[in-house]
Structures are given as C-alpha cells and as structure tokens.
Image (cartoon, rainbow, N blue to C red):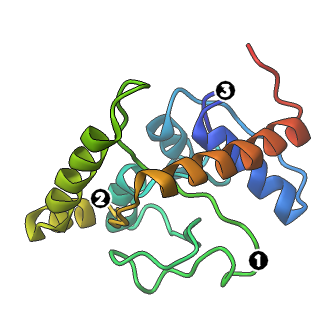
Amino acid sequence: MASAGGFMHFVSALFRSQAGVEATIALYKGGAPALTDVTGGHAHMAIATVPTANPHLTSGRLKALATGGTRRLQAMPDLPTAAEAGLPGYEASIWWGWATAAGTPAAIIDKLNAEVRAILKAPETAKRFAVNGAQIEPRTPAEIREMVGADLVKWEKVARDAGMKKQ
C-alpha cells in the first residue's frame, strides 16, 4: 500500500520480491488511507511506518507482524525483525538526515554535525523519538554519504525489478 514511487511503494515491492509472493501493490495517497482499508477489511495487509500504524496497533485493530529494520524497535521489543519472522535479508528502514548546500565548508558541516549530535543525545529528544518508534543512530557526514550511495543502488534495483517507471 503506497503512493506511486514513494517509500512504501518501494518497500512493498521489495517485500513482494524477497518473499516470492504474487501480490498487487495498491497505491494510496499515504499510509493512513491504506491502513483504513486494512482495518476496514478492504485490503489484506499494509507495510506502514510506526507513527502511522501505532494508533491502530494500540487500539487492537491491527497486529504488527515484523519490523523492517535489522534490529528490534525499542518501542516494540517483542516485535521480531522481518529476518527473525522468516524473511532473511529483508531490510527497509526510513532514516532522516540533515543537509546543507553543496560546497559548504567542511568546518561548518562538522560544526553542524556536532550540534545535531548534541541535540540527539539529549534525553528529551530520545523520548520524543521513541514515542514515534524512532531510534536515534547518529552518523558522520562520511557515513551518510556511504548510506546514500548504498541506498541508491539498492532501491534502483528494486525499482527496475518491479518495473517501476519514472513519471
């Protein structure tokens, strides 16, 4: 369940491919409408973010089967990863990063990175992230560049294998 070309479209295509299932990916204008259809019995399942799914999970209208990350969520320690649930190699996580203009001097980037890390280490920040099922994993600018490169290769293959077309 996803909007065309959005993250949920990609993770659904990855799931379908790695699980070896024939399934139609229904395209929605976001996770909330998709989950509404699942809770209403109009769709069989959805791959959704924790913030979007959490109200339905806590109310008991949805049951979480696995997390797409490589580690269990601190907010849901009993929820297995997809690999633990029987889909080894599946990994699909949303991550956030900060960016600045190309050509920004390294000293400024390092200062910004240090300041963001300090904010992320604050207990209040960790609490606010945890409420939404997010886990803080600070990275250096070099690590982010490496992650972006690896993600581009991974998701380009998913798009190609799924027959996604640029619009």
How many numbered circles does the render carry? Answer: 3
Element marked by disc 2: loop
Quarter residue 135 falls in: bottom left
Dividing the image into 4 quarters, which one contains the N terminus? top right
Among the two numbered marks 1 and 2 on one chain, the one whose residue lies closer to the N terminus = 1
Among the two numbered marks 2 and 3 on one chain, the one whose residue lies closer to the N terminus = 3
Q: Which residue sits at x=75%, y=57%?
A: 15
**Left or right: 53 in relation to 7:** left
In the rendered structure, are the residues bearing label 2 and label 3 in contact, judged by CB atoms less than 8 Å apart? no
Tag 3 residue: 4
- Above or below, 79 against 5 in this view is below
Q: Amino acid at mark 1?
A: Pro
Marks 2 and 3, how far apart in space?
Answer: 24 Å
Element marked by disc 1: loop
Dividing the image into 4 quarters, which one contains the C terminus? top right
Element marked by disc 3: loop
Q: Which residue sits at x=36%, y=59%?
A: 54
**Residue nearest the observer in this picture, 147 or 68:** 147
Label at residue 132: 2
Q: Amino acid at mark 2?
A: Asn
Tag 1 residue: 88
